[in-house]
Image (cartoon, rainbow, N blue to C red):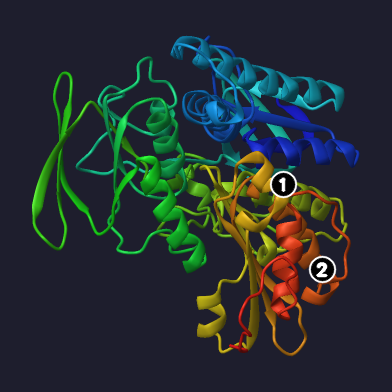
Amino acid sequence: MSEQYEVIVIGAGPAGYVAAIRCAQLGFNVACIDDYLDERGKPSPGGTCLNVGCIPSKALLESSHHYQQAGKQFAEHGIGVGQLALDLATMQRRKQKVVRDLTGGIHALFKANQVAFYAGRGTLKQHNQVEVIDHESNTTTLQAEHIILASGSRPVELPFAPFDDKQVVDSTGALAFDAVPQRLGIIGAGVIGLELGSVWQRLGSEVVVLEARDTFLPDADSAIAKQANKLLGQQGLDIRLGSKVKNVNPTKNSVKVSYSNEQDEQTLTFDKLIVAVGRRPNSESLCADDLDLRIDERGFVQVDDHYRTNLEKVYAVGDLIPGPMLAHKGMEEGMAVAERIAGQFAEVDYDNIPFVIYTHPEIAWTGRTEQQLKDAGIDYTAGQFPFSANGRARAAGETDGLIKVLAEARTDRVLGVHMIGPQASELIGQAVIARAFATSAEDLALTMFAHPTLSETFHEAALDVADRAIHRAPPRKKQH
């Protein structure tokens, strides 16, 4: 006999658990299914983000940054730490505690909102029926009027570099090293590669990042990307652009990587190799074959503007559908699809998504880059301001980076904000809010910012759009 619900969500990552909770808030009887088990073998909702992605990586980034500061920056503040020692096991245990606290919080939220949680693999068998096979091979059948697919994504595996969870690892394996690799190779200079490379470089690894593309961070504004490449290189990340990996040969204690660039072919030997070339949606075996769920050649489930698939009352959100694979994008879609099911108006502003790279300094942006505006033939004005001229940044000793504001020439409406610098991940929220309300650069210029704060750099960049920056004297700019 089937257990009956009004909404079933397959997947308890950011998109799935948010969809389940929002549906429950709207009065639906909801079940959520997820098959992830933590290292103790216990059900652990939260998807890649909470378990082996966003949260544990930020925990290690924070810990490794403290370690680097203690070794290199504390002295200039008059703080002596004596003999510096790394306790990686404690660092890893702290990371896992952070993860458990947050995944446990989702269990509590499900209970508080009366969301039924099923630990197991969910498969859509009919338009309104889901089969759940738990980790002891027991089968439960659930039925609901509405089904939301939110099964997330997984790392892309290169055919010539299969993961062996020893020498060749994905992002999950790279978060679980029990010793600092002396020589660490990374394939891919995207967000994941740069963040994981930063963690282990700070802790003592010699890191080489091999990137096939000739352009560094092509989705970022070119000025920001150029400065990021320079600063990360100064920190010790050896980023080699235009390097196409040809062969990966793991041995018992090392891995040889052969690659080619414009000059020649080279072979490097590493203790560990991280493959970080992107992620792909978990759309295989999500539905019975006879349902014919529409999936494109890249594995993304096809949906309309209401997140509806080609199957009646079956929806898909998060990494499973086209668009940036970001937890916050999935969360917004989870809320939106729940409200759509309830008959409410809801939409996600895909033109105003914040992008963040949690290196040090942090990199963040929203809206269009200068190159995109030029390609679109849009006349614009630009203003920028360096953190080196900001009082709070000076006091903190965090002076690398800048903030750039791009505004439409005719209307002065802010079209893009790009930054590299201290706490950029927090500062970008101000830009997202500004753009959400169609703010002009003049609006920002007329807004009072507290002093001394890092956010004054954003204020001065907005002032600079009209050549009004106070704390430096830039040359007169021309409209682009």
> Looking at the picture, does residue 248 appear above or below residue 467?
above
Residue 82 shows in this picture: yes
Read off the residue under disc 1: 392
Identify the secondary structure beneath mark 2: helix
Kind of residue sitting beneath label 1: Arg
x, y percentage for residue 298? 41, 56
The residue at the point 45 percent across, 14 percent down is 84
| Percent of width and height locating residue 288 | 50, 41
Up-down relation of residue 39 to residue 277 (above or below): above
Mark before the other along the chain sequence, 1 or 2: 1
Specify the quadrant of the image occupied by residue 435: bottom right
Residue at left 74%, top 30%? 31
Give the quadrant of residue 9.
top right
Question: Hey, which quadrant is residue 182 in on the image?
Answer: top left
Front residue (pair 180, 193): 180
Q: For this view, does 451 lie left or right of residue 212?
A: right
For label 1, the SS is helix
- For the residue pair 323 and 148, the one nearer the viewer reads as 323
Q: Which residue is outermost to the right?
A: 27
Answer with left or right where residue 214 lies relative to residue 23: left
- The image's mark for residue 444 is 2
Q: Position of residue 399 (x, y in %)?
A: 59, 49
Q: Of residues 288 and 374, which is closer to you in this image?
A: 374
Q: Is any part of residue 284 visible from this angle?
A: no
